[in-house]
Image (cartoon, coloured by chain):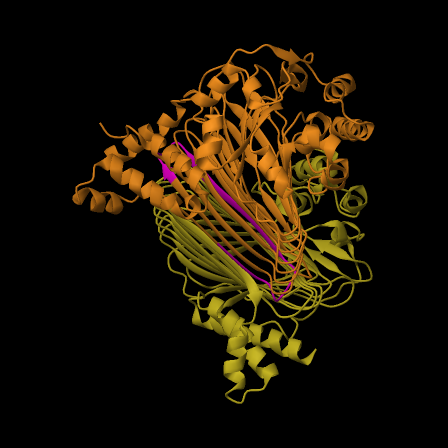
Chain colours: A yellow, B orange
Amino acid sequence: MKQSALLVHPFGARYAAALPAADSARREARETLALEGLPGPKREEWRFTPLRGLAKIPFIPAASAEDIDVRDIPADVPRFAGAVRVVLVNGVYRADLSDKVSEAGLAIMEAKTPDHDVHAPLAVLNAAYMSGGVTIAARGVVAKPVHIVSIGAAGAEPAAFHPRFAVAVAPAAKLTVLETHHGLPGQPYFSNPVTTISVGTAGVLRRYVLVREDSEAFHLATTVADVAADAKFDAFHLGLGGALVRQEINVDFVGEGAAVRLNGAYALTGRAHHDFTTFMNHDMPNCTSSQVFKGVVDGESRGVYQGRLLVARHAQKTDGQQLHKALFLSRGPQIDCKPELEIYADDVKCAHGATTGEMDPDHLFYLAARGIDPQAARLLLVQGFLADALENVDDAAVHDILSAEISGWLMRKASA
Amino acid sequence: MAAKQETAAAVRDVEQYKYGFVTDIESDKAPKGLSEDIIRFISAKKNEPDWMLEARLKAYRYWLTLAGEEPAWAKLTYPKIDYQASYYYAAPKQKLASMDEVDPKLLETYKKLGIPLAEQAVLAGVAVDAVFDSVSVATTYKKKLEEMGVIFKPISEAVHSHPELVKKYLGSVVPYTDNFFAALNAAVFTDGSFVYIPKGLRCPMELSTYFRINEKNTGQFERTLIIADEGAYVSYLEGCTAPMRDENQLHAAVVELITLDDAEIKYSTVQNWYPGDAEGKGGIYNFVTKRGACRGKNSKIMWTQVETGSAITWKYPSCILQGDNSVGEFYSVAITNNHQQADTGTKMIHLGANTRSKIISKGISAGKADNTYRGLVRIGAKADGARNYTQCDSLLIGDKCGAHTVPYIESRNPTAQTEHEATTSKISEDQLFYCQQRGMTEEEAVSLIVNGFCREVLQTLPMEFAVEAQKLVGISLEGSVG
């Protein structure tokens, strides 16, 4: 690799020295990290999301900071009624804030070591300094959903943490997981979660992710999912801000007849940067994948969608769809979009679409003609635009939570 | 699935290359390899002014700093090119003053290519600036065009006759620092066409050039510069065929287009160079930088390309839409077969207000070929009311080929609208069945469907080319049944 592709970053010897001695898995990852570094702007997958800003901040491991004390769940964290709540503060499982698990078929354990190799630059960083995490295993139909709450906070110095999540859905099992990421204002913190997912044969996993980090925070999440034959993986990701947020989701089709829906939305103000990067690896015949991402950008924010869809030579009868729609709310933001198809099988149906633009003046006029003032009309239209994306959320309770989050974002924007 | 196999077999016929022959003409060659001396040799051969030599050397020195690092981002694999193993200058020996003096052998070559020069000029009203290897040997209709103020001549002549225009515009759209191949071209380009259309003139005839790589082991480095002054219009046609040979040949052309206020350039290409044999042996490596700058208000640049040849195609005809209300259009059909690889597309850079661009790309992949559309639509912060529409469709014939779409959309202006659509499919059994039910043979049906698939692009070609292009698509489908 060319030297210019590397980035000098704060996760070197000084960072490691603040932590106890590493086990073999972490040591290996640290060696890789020292060798490969963090991706620089010349790395194609990172061209729209530069890490220069992140690399300039002298993070310390959150675990080594003694001045961070989070005793309660912040009031603005949504309540998911009826769910088993699992709380992590700075990437470390907090039994005192979490619910006890007594649900049949559901096991939640604290994760200690990075036991899966995930080949992505940020996942290497995660493995090198993994701070903690949880492993969730489901057998049979699990009635109660799981709500993972991740809270980030820094003390006097910027702090970083690297949690691991593993979600395993056994064959024919069913599970719903909501993951919400929040933080406390103050010095910037950097959340670097890695999630490994496996959905067994004919299993069903519904995963919903909300990223509403503090406006100074960094959140670079990597998810890898294996989806087995006839399994269903249904995901929705909502991004409502952070200084730099990337949600990277890689899906491997490991059995025939699997169906994946990967949807999302983002709403950004100020200088927020949000990146959805997806990779659908169609390596099996007769699988379907569908992606719909919608975003609104305001202020000087930047929205990114990069989707890669790979259909292997033998993955005949693949149905793969990608759609990204972005709406500008003002002058100043930027939208970057790269939907990519790489197809080696002929009997497939693959398509992608992408649009950017501002609000249709006809729509505004329609509402204005009915006596709605322009400001309210705009909010209404933005809400409608995002609500449309939420239609893909099947779980009614989660739908309401995310819908309320979008309303909250609009209120904050209107009052700003 | 008989139809599929037969269609695959049909497209394989592209390889039955009609124009595989070598004309033997004594050529005046520079020694093998690339160095400052070779560049001085080329420059001296052309009796160039000092500023031109300086520009070449500057580009060459820059190229050296790239240390052989060719762009690696395209979806192409090919063996490392040894730039020292090529000849950089080869010219037919005789200098020619008129058509009568043209070597009969050369004329015969053109005949085989299907372009009887004199006949074509009279019959089709097309002025042909034919490039044989690297030096322009015959220019027709020169006088007629000259009377109207059109300058249409080899760029090596324009350097002498119109140095102010060449100085002003050469390298202004594609600077030598643009990319590896543009730097190489700027250093060693041997010839190409220069066109200047004066203010307010609608060029009454289609201008065309035939490029042909002939000398063994000769890289072909064409340089084309077309300027349409205020209110001018020109339609320029470029078509190419090349003789069959085993060694890979490098071609790195640069084409620059400039339109001033209210001007329009229509640039059409049919590219049918030797694609290599069924095993992927031989074939042309085609690394081309084509770019147009819509500098003036209400100006327009339209690229149409039909790409059927070359082992490697690396080509992104682009538009920089600087003038307000300027328009860029890109229509492309790329057919790849056997081991051909094409990575082609466009860039539409919207800088001015109310600029509009349209991209229609049709990729057809057969055999073991890979066909990639790679495009960029960038809307600058000042491009109020800009509009882009992109449509990329890929057709896969057989299950050993690949079709890829890599669009980049970067928008910084809220009032701009971009739309992108892409689909990948195969010829549907239903369509085939429907046609066959109405008495068509399978081959006719496939031909009809593929022609329909490309129609949007083919119909943008000028008449002369449309016929050739349709034939090309036709040839590729011949013998697919029985």
Per the image, is B403 magenta? yes
Q: Name the image quarter holding the C terminus of chain A.
A: bottom right
As drawn, is B250 to the left or to the right of B105? right
Question: How far from the left and from the top, in percent, is residue B193?
Answer: 62, 33
Q: What x and y, as percent, mark residue B127?
A: 53, 34
Whether residue A207 is visible:
yes
The residue at the point 29 percent across, 45 percent down is B428
Q: Which image quarter is the N terminus of chain A in?
A: top right
In the depicted structure, whether residue A65 falls above or below residue B6: below
**Magenta region, mostly helix, strand or loop?**
strand
Q: Which residues are magenta?
A: B396-420
Indicate yes or no whether the magenta region holds residue A365: no
Q: Is residue A206 above or below residue B70?
A: below
Residues B129 and A186: in front is B129
| Drawn side of residue B62 relative to residue A322, left or right | right
* Occupied quadrant, residue A335: bottom right
Side (left or right) of B345 relative to B455: right
Would you place residue B161 above or below residue A275 in this image?
Answer: above
Picture residue at 29% right of the left edge, 31% below the top: B5
x%, y% of residue A269? 67, 68
Q: Residue at 51% x, 77% y: name it.
A: A363
